[in-house]
Image: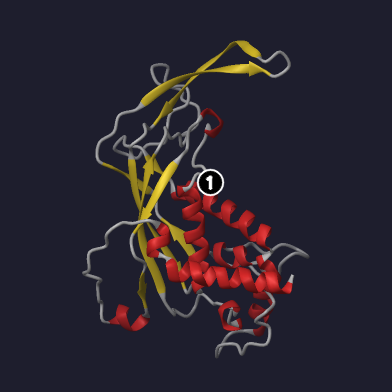
Amino acid sequence: MNADDLRPRHHAALERIVLFDFVLTCQTGLHIGAGKSSDFAGSDLPVVRDASGRPFIPGSSLRGVLRAGIESFSLSLGLDALRGMAKDVALPAGMPEDFAKGWRELNLVERLFGAVAEEKKRTISYGSRFQISDAKCVGDTLFEVRDGVGIQRETRTAASSVKFDVEVVPAGTQFQGRVRLKNPADYEVGLIAQALWMLSEGVLLLGGKSSRGLGWVTVSVTQPRELKATALLARKRDESEQDLGPVEDKFQQYLDSLQELADAAAAVS
């Protein structure tokens, strides 16, 4: 693990952009809720829809699941033991020392997902370098409505007058979206890849009502594309076919970098 991988990364400079597309395939029903419905003819708990009435997965929902997965993964492996490793690395020209000092206060997840300044905890606010689009529904889909009933915890029996229904996107439905990372280290791309793999393996679940069997998905991704400022100036586009495949096949170099980070953290703990 190179200490330069953990150096401060400022938003002002554009070192590289990493882009890739993903497709989520529902293995079970999926419920991303839109809140309680006021439509007497509709479901009590409808799924979120776009302006044309099609289901979609908000980027905020995916972001929350991935961040939670990365936070627990990083905590379990003690990855933050390395966050001060780059204190002696020379700062890029023009980078303020107070920014670099504030950066070193951030943990690895905050450096990727962003953080807000808090008194006595962190001195800088830092914007996210990870963006994820809403995932749009691929093709046509129908909706399922499933009945539910409230349970009295004391008696473990159905509660009187607590019946409801839940709208669900059925198994087999696919959603497509895109991920963008600005100035990431290879291990940071690896963290996102690891979380997507965990989602595909059922370690992480998506949406609500997971205790009722919902929220299991598989993930396929395209090969990441790395764009630097010179390529952007030439307005080059990647014309190669971006076929979908398993995360571990498309992101192996980034997962290897994450493994190096984990090994280095284990060595100092």
Query: Which residue extends farthest right?
Result: 120
Quarter in which the C terminus is drawn: bottom right
Q: Is residue 67 left or right of residue 183?
A: right
Colour setting = secondary structure
Residue at 49% in and 39% down: 207
- In the rendered image, residue 12, in percent from the top left (x then y), is placed at 49, 78
Say whether residue 181 is left or right of residue 74: left
| 149 up-or-down from 221: above or below | above
- Position in image of residue 151 (x %, y %): 63, 17
Q: Is residue 227 above or below residue 97?
A: above
Question: Residue at coordinates 40% horizontally, 38% vertically from top-left?
Answer: 27
Query: What is the number of callouts on the image?
Result: 1
Is the residue 168 above or below the residue 268 in the image?
above
The quadrant in which residue 227 appears is: bottom left
For the residue carrying disc 1, how many other residues have a C-alpha within 10 Å: few (<14), some (14-19), or many (20+)? some
User: What secondary structure is marked by label 1?
Assistant: loop
Q: Is residue 178 visible?
A: yes
Q: Quadrant of residue 106?
A: bottom right
Position of residue 195 measured from the top left corner of the image (x, y, whole percent)? 51, 55
- Residue drawn at (56%, 88%) of the image: 94
| Residue 105 shows in the view | no
Q: Residue 252 versus residue 152: which sits nearer the camera?
A: 252
Reply above or below: 85 against 117. below
Report which residue position mark 1 lands on. 204
9 on left or right of 221: right
How far across and down, in percent of the image, does residue 263 sit? 62, 71
Amino acid at dot 1? Leu
